Image (cartoon, grey):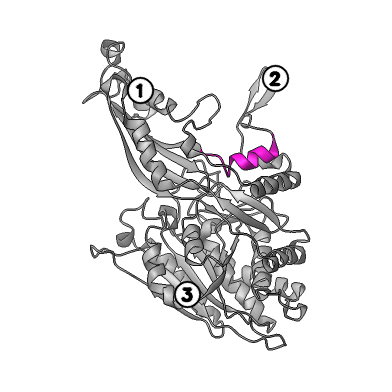
Amino acid sequence: MNARTDATVLQPSAASELVNQRWQQDILPALHQYIEVPAKSPSFDAQWATHGHIDTVLRQAADWVSAQKVPGLKLEILRLNAPDGSPRTPVLFFELPASDGAHGGAAPASGQTVLMYGHLDKQPEFTGWRNGLGPWTPRVLEDRLYGRGGADDGYAVYASIAALQAIQAQGAAHPRVVGLIETSEESGSFDLLPYVDALRPRLGDVGLVVCLDSGAGNYDQLWLTTSLRGMASGVLKVDVLTEGVHSGDASGVVPSSFRIMRQVLDRLEDSATGRLLPRNFHCEVPAERVQQAQATAAILGADAYQRFPWAHHDCGGATLVTLPMTQDPAEALLARTWRPTLSVTGAAGFPALQDAGNVLRPYTAFKLSLRLPPLVDAAQAVQDLKTLLEDNAPYQARVTFEPEGAASGWNAPEVQPWFEQALHASSQAYFGAPCGFIGQGGTIPLMNLLSLGFPKAQMMVCGVLGPKSNAHGPNEFLHLPFAKKLTAAVAEVIVRMP
């Protein structure tokens, strides 16, 4: 099957002009409104249904899409209940039939569908926002829109519609397009599968998935995500006492719950290097991914590891900066995409510093986030992790690991010739540089589901989370010039679908 003819390719300057106009006049105000709503994912807001924030942002998005009056587009909000009768997080679904171009060119002969994906739920606030910035306070500074969720992933539904508008404005032929915008992604997409099952007859023969929930190596070219790590998370707790006791009286007799915690974690991680010790948490890196990492390292150089907000301090007149675990750009790329890593993302059992007296604490609890290589089964990893941490506890302390989630990673299917040509052509047209290929360290549970459901589909997994955009953390921002170019590039790839 050949790529679409040049007659059906968009005129880049016209597409860019329309997309820029839509972003400035329509999308940016909508994203300001979106950021203001604390639509935290259910894992971070157990009362999400009562609070209504998720419903608010979903309704705002639906109203905005309807107001665009895209010819032929149908939209609806879907709501399902769980088996116990409780409401599932809602989704937004839209459908646009295939169309022959008004100015020449035939619709795709394959009759395949493009599936566009995004999500509207958000991570919690976090601390450390700079003065004048905040999670629910949208603000544009130097072409960056700050605020929680704008880049991850509130912009996706708006950019998707703008891409379709750019296609229709030029009268170009396009395939059938459906959109699925969910609201539980930041909680592991636990509600998504029932909707996919319910919608399966309406999704059609999906030949291209456009997922706008990923990252970018820089802001200078289009980036295709080639892999995603999986994740296993849970709470590890060490109990030694029923209540806190005077540390002067008990220390030396009562073992510290924190020290036991350190011993238990030593089974999992080499604290000197950060390497995870169990072999079953590792996998062999495919040769193609190693080659792509080397090619991307040649593009990014030291930016592969310098992109993060490293702490620095003065020492004897010299400024010292925290060192990365590796200064080899290719190894840095592989380490954050194909190596398992452990992060402690929360803790309990500790009083605030100002409240900390001379007390030996009764317990220590850590929230563990274990990032897994794309080819490691997350469900099995959780069970292995529980056994490893709980068995044979030091001092016969009560050590428990309560799993909270597991999502396997994803390795992209082989890129078909038409798709590779479309990616490079789109990147050259709107960025003036070829497409880059990069793995991502985050997790998008939907991707494995879509790969299994549509094994022949090409996966355009991309996004705006480039250097220092800091999704999930303080000062999260959306790089507006990049987002506009990405929107136009998505339109270009869609019309080139065979």
Q: Earlier in the sequence, mark 3 or mark 1?
A: 3
- Give the mark toward the camera: 3 or 1: 3
Q: Which residue is mark 2?
A: 317
Q: Amino acid at mark 1?
A: Ile
CA distance separating discs 1 and 2:
39 Å
List the residue tagged with mark 1: 260
- In the picture shown, does residue 366 fall above or below 134? above
Nearer to us: label 2 or label 3: 3
The quadrant of the picture occupied by the C terminus is bottom right
Question: Can residue 144 be seen in the rendering of this structure?
Answer: no
Q: Residue at x 21, y 26 (%)?
A: 242
| Amino acid marked by disc 3 | Leu
Which region of the structure is painted magenta?
328-340
- Per the image, the residue denoted by label 3 is 203
The type of residue carrying mark 2 is Gly
Could you tell me how far apart the alpha carbons at marks 2 and 3 are, in whole angstroms? Answer: 63 Å
Element at label 1? helix
SS for tag 3?
helix
Residue 398 shown left or right of residue 410 in the figure: left
Q: Nearer the viewer, residue 37 or 425?
A: 425
Picture quarter with the N terminus:
bottom right
Q: Tell me whether circle 3 and circle 1 mark residues in contact (CB < 8 Å).
A: no
Helix, strand or loop for disc 2: loop
